Image: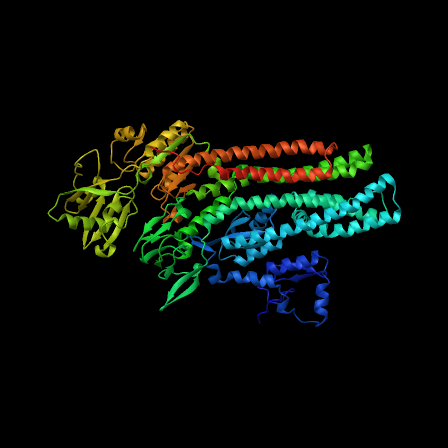
Amino acid sequence: MTQSPPACFHCGLPCTDSTEYKLVILNESRDLCCPGCKAVAEAIIDAGMESYYQHRDSGNPGSSPAPELVPAFLSQLNAWDDPEIQHAYVRTATSAEQATASVTLMISGITCAACVWLIEHQLERMPGIVKAKVNLSTHRAEIEWHADQLQLSDILKSISKVGYKAEPYTPHIQEETITKENRQALSRIGVAGLGTMQVMMFAAGLYAGDYQGIDIPHETFLRWVSALVCIPVYVYAGGPFLKGAIRNIRTRHLGMDVPVSIAITAAFFASLWSTFTIGPEVYFDSVCMFIFFLSVGRYLEMRARHRSIASSIRTSQQGVIMARVKQGDDWQLTPADRLKCGDVVYVKAGETIPGDATIESGTTLVNEAMLTGEDTPLEKTKNDNVTGGTINVEQPITIIINKDPKDSVLYALRRLLDQAQSEKPGITQLADRIAGYFVLGVLLVATITFTSWYFIEPANAFWIMLAVLVVTCPCALSLATPAAITTATARLANQGFLPTHARFIESFRHITDVVFDKTGTLTHGQFSITKTINLSSQPDQQLLIIAAALEMHSEHPIASAFTANFAARDLPDAQQLKVERNQGIEGVINGQSYRIGKAAFAAELTNKPAPEPPKADSQWVLLANEQQALAWFNVADALRRDAKSLIQFLNAQGLACHILNGDSSEPPAAIAKELGVPDVVNNASPEEKLAHIRALQNQGKRVLMIGDGLNDAPVLAGADVSIALSSGTDLAKVAADAVLLNHQISSLSHVFVVVNKTYRIIQQNLSWALVYNLLALPAAALGFVPPWMAAIGMSSSSLIVVFNALRIQKVSANLNTITD
């Protein structure tokens, strides 16, 4: 007979694995069903309320706890496992090995680098976690896990176990969180401010009594009323510091909240003891003043952080929650994240387009500044594609949704932005490690300082120790880099340039050489057929139809020259397709094999030598079948207007430019003359392009590669830094360190300005954080810094770092820095 699984000691539900979650409760090892119940049980025990279980069971001995004992918040977290709810938040990917899921979380309660370390390590210990990265500036986390080993609710419960609240991120949730944080912070400042003023009023009487004398009953009365006023300040306004310190101590990772909490707790309880025993000194006014100054500093820091991520919210915000979807003869309001392909949606003038779609009826102007940074509206009419998140400026339109919300450009844009802001460059990781050791050093210095002053001047030993604990600020060190990178990333994203990896800004300034792919990068990538030379007896139009039927299955920019004038339904079906990268495409149409592409590739099908192109100074594409070469097509692609000026700008910066051209459109000498670039390689395969990159790197060069992001993927991956030009429609396929969305390569000059400014800001922040702490700590230890000034100095140190980073937002946003 199969033994039934034991019941969970906390909630009474069956345990799926009685050996996985156990906890000693009431001196016995108890089975628990999940991490959530274990976390709650640990919290009850840690709070000294273990007797709860005795009282719970005493009313009905032998019975299992009722399901209602499961906390409401655990039930709410379990709801995130519903596939319909997850649909709008969780991204899935399936590989040959395992299916993985990923999500962006918004986490409440983060105050310093120690919080980030704690959450990351808590998650990394969970079986099935692939990646867990938390950003200190945005309070967002990028989590990836094996979907068959973990549920989303398990991750959320694990984060709640260490004292933080997490939920799947959307811009709307973040705005609500910001509003809530702001309200709570102001409330705490209000309590601390009122308490400080009131206690200072009582303290004035005590100070006067020290000089003029005061009756003991009056002194005792003033001390007790000071204590009563100080208690809510210590418990409520100082709560975030105390909770943070408890978390740090429990996880054995020291953060800035630890010395701060030690200082205010020591002063508070020393004052209470002195009040009980009628001792010599009380410090209630100092406790209130500490908490007030620190709360004001943390609030201003928080507001600055909110400002730094506000632009990234605007960049990634869909801006519309509901959409008018056609249901029969009526229009029904439907959540935008529940839209499906084929839904017909009505969009009024001035509204945000709710998803990627095709215009069914109407003509209007659409503002695509969200995507490209350009405020000039573009005309859109029937059958044109529009992007979710852009603004319908002029006339009402009816659109047909053509992409699932999770496959949309807006979703990919938000994911890449979150990825960039959640990653940590090397300099940030180093600063975090230093900050952790720094706090331990502060505690040691404070101990030594108190011991030394106790023998030198006992009356001041306590005050000086408090100043040492409060004045130092490793937070400034931890914030120095992420604050600048978050601001720079948001600034660039608003201008149509999207860094996708945090290392981009760190690596970009070290480049020595810039390598361009010509087609679609220095040129528009919009090919047109300028001439057709018919080598067969078939009509030109028939040859164009065959060529278009093949090219419609190619992603190469040249394909657009053939497919632009044909609808897919008007073309014959091509089968048995074989695409040879950088060569051409082969397929079977009506039982006949055809090839189109480079002459050697196409002629190979005929088993005859490749014919010579009509002219060597232009680009020709050959169409052939098994019998003969059928036609030459001359295709042309004009250079971008600002290509030459960009290269001149780069040369002026001391950077060497190179062009790797996958086509044979022009001889190297002609390209070199037109653009002023001596190093031009024509007819290069992806392997040859990568080899050229490697050759430069072997010479000690740091290479920036700029390509189209799709055809140049291997070369982009091989460069030290890479930038992809993307129309946005293929944003999810791009694998580069940054993406240029507006296709104005002149805006790369603005990137240089922002990156250089950001690096200078990082250097300034780190220098300030180090200099401040190196000067402030000895000064406090020598008794030159009173505790109230230490609190102001500590808060100011973090504020200076954050506000200095915000200066990046003021860098000129002119996208036409380079002009002809």
Residue 654 placed where, x, y %? 41, 27
Location of the C terminus by quadrant is: top left
Location of the N terminus by quadrant is: bottom right
Residue 29 placed where, x, y %? 68, 60
Q: How many marks?
A: 0
Image side of residue 252 versus residue 136, left or right: right
Tell me if I can see residue 507 in this picture. Answer: no
Residue closer to the observer: 470 or 716: 470
Tell me if I can see residue 272 in this picture. Answer: yes
> How is the rendered protein coloured?
rainbow
Residue in the image at 21% along x and 56% along y: 570
Quarter of the rendering containing residue 673: top left
Residue closer to the observer: 157 or 259: 259
Quarter of the rendering containing residue 768: top right
Q: Is residue 58 above or below residue 335?
A: below
Image side of residue 246 versus residue 361, left or right: right
Residue in the image at 61% along x and 35% along y: 769
Residue in the image at 55% along x and 32% along y: 763
Image side of residue 658 versus residue 164, left or right: left
Q: Is residue 567 above or below residue 206?
A: below
Image side of residue 19 versus residue 649, left or right: right
Residue closer to the observer: 694 or 547: 547
Residue closer to the observer: 303 or 418: 303
Residue 16 placed where, x, y %? 57, 64
Quarter of the rendering containing residue 49: bottom right
| Identity of the residue furthest to the left in this view | 537
Residue 732 placed where, x, y %? 40, 49
